[in-house]
Amino acid sequence: MAYDLSFARDVYKNSEMGHWIKMCKQCGVCAGSCPLGPHWEFSPRQLFQMVRAGKKEEVLKSHSMWMCTSCYNCIVRCPRGLPITHIVHGLARYASVKGYADPDQVTNRFATRIFWTNIVSTGRVGEAMLTMRLYFVDGIAAGIKQGLEMKDSALGMLKAKRLNPIPLRGKIKGYAGFQAMLTKAQELEEKRESGV
Amino acid sequence: MADDQAAGQTILVVGGGISGLTAAVEAAEVGYKVLLVEKDPHLGGRVAQHYQYFPKLCSPSCGLEINYQRVKNNPLIRVMTLAEVEDIQGTEGNYTVRIRQNPRFVTEKCTGCGDCSRACTVTVPNPFNFGMNEIKAIRASHAMAYPGHYFMDAAYARSAEAQTLVSVCPVGAIDPNMSATTLEEKVGSIVWATGWQPYDAEKIQPYGFGRFANVSTNMRFERLANTYGPTGGTLTRPSDGKEIKNIAFIQCAGSRDHNHLPFCSRVCCLASMKQATYVRSQFPDAKVTIYYIDLRAMDRYEGFQKKVEADPSITWIKSKPARIDEDPVTKDPIVVGENTLTGVRYADPYDMVVLATGMEPNSATTARVPAQAVAYDEYGFVVKGGQVLSTGCTATPLDVAAAVQAGTAVALKAIQSAARRG
């Protein structure tokens, strides 16, 4: 069987921090360090080896790289110093750009439909609105149920001033500049990802 | 001048472990004067702490005993124990070294009768057994200690009880008022053989050594298996004295890891295989699990690996475990990680877990070379290019047989170096 290296080479070049995948020595520490370890289909180690083995479809259609919560345990423990968190986020982004990402994957859905629209509309994260939209994403009944379940945490956060209760606080000062920054960043990212 | 000529022919060997000991006897047996300086009260170094060698599984005591005989019977070798080299001046062929002689508080009149030790009421954690048991504050380090004269811990020497031991000794060898002295010696060449220490396992935080009673290290396990060890050679675990019948070894614990020792110490895979045989021969129903990234049975030792692999009670799991947890009730360590051949995440309990820690050169920390010109590599090993000739595990991680070869080789280099006197 011949290996097709074109996928691996493209990941090394075009996926953020992707070149580090070459350094993985397949020891397995990342998988055991991950608090969500048992819930991934593939551990970071497996994803990296699959990239190296040219398994493009399996890697890019996988939900595994969307499971990362950025706790950084794996980065701290990796004996080779791979920035695993960043590599994994890079692969998620790469899958999006290549059109493989499942729009209904929970992390993807939260990121693109809830978090992004929330922050872009005003220039700041409106926690109350963000939480509400997250809870009600599966319908009104599910939203109310979730909200009641989290009631005590929410009140605690209010007390500790960790949650702003006003759902709409208006735009930040200099919103136009914020939008210009986003437009420029997107332009740069598109340029980078088109390989120019 | 006659004195100069003599000076040019004395070889200083720093470190009385297996490589320094070998270098000393080899140089002396071809006619050179040797000054052997050792910081501990006894010779033998790390090898003396081992239970068995691989691959033949014999005790290190016979090899050491032969070397002690060679030292004892050779008038050209002068041994200084409890001594450290503080300064090196001069050039190749004509060095002046300053040596600090720490007090032993017991003179060479000591016959090793043990009366003082029996009279002594103070015990200290036994450094020879890594503090796993207590020993008298006046003693010989271990049963095979050479020189056999007793010594006293410095803290104990200042106590009132130490003074009372003077009259206990039948030959008048005890002197708690002894103090450190400094002397200068002229030597022609210098062999640096200060060896290694086990990497500090407490630094490998996820493995819980120091927090979990039943997480041990490979060097501690050598003492645990030893007849003169803390349990008299019975393999029982510290938390409850239970027989160790289900044990795991974790390879590359703090090795090949940019957070710890980045290099491979070459011996730990074989040492764990060897220690697996300790458990399997003591308890025929015992199970052993070895976690590894890849097995490195260096040089000619693959045959030993094959022999150990033939034992069906030993399981090999290709994985570097991510962490160790502890069962709060049983105190069993639970090894957590991913089997990299199956992709299965495991969390398996054991009676004991042994961390196969690597070798950190003492020259990186406690035994820096006090010379103007000295060459270290990035890990603190002493390499070619400086004034001193390094050998054994001061130069690179080695097994015992290779350390003996290195010691023999450096003896010739030291003779040549002494002859090139400026």
Image (tube, coloured by chain):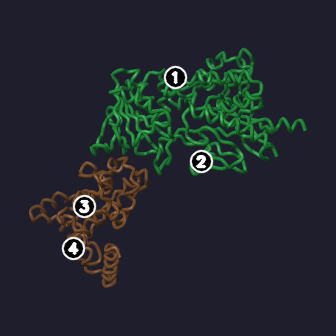
Q: Residues within 10 Å of mark 4 (few under 14, many from 20)?
A: few
Report the disc number at residue A60. 3
Give the chain of mark 3.
A
Residue A80: x and y in percent read: 43, 53
Alpha carbons under labels 3 and 2: distance apart: 44 Å
Q: Amino acid at mark 1?
A: Cys
Residue assigned mark 1: B58
Give the chain of mark 1.
B
Residue assigned mark 4: A167
Residue A142: x and y in percent read: 11, 61
Q: Do the residues under discs 1 and 3 have CB atoms within 8 angstroms? A: no
Residue assigned mark 2: B380
Alpha carbons under labels 3 and 4: distance apart: 36 Å
Q: Do the residues under discs 3 and 4 have CB atoms within 8 angstroms? A: no
Of residues A188 and B409, the one drawn nearer to the viewer in this rendering = B409
Q: Amino acid at mark 4?
A: Pro
Q: Amino acid at mark 2?
A: Gly
Alpha carbons under labels 1 and 2: distance apart: 31 Å
Comparing labels 3 and 2, the label whose residue is closer to the camera: 3
Tell which circle, 1 or 2, labels the residue nearer the N-terminal end: 1
Please tell me which residue is depicted at 44% across the width and 21% down the height of the picture: B234
From this view, report whether residue A139 is shown above or below residue B248. Answer: below
Give the chain of mark 4.
A
Q: Residues within 10 Å of mark 3 (few under 14, many from 20)?
A: many
Question: What shade has chain A been given?
Answer: brown
Residue A48: x and y in percent read: 33, 55
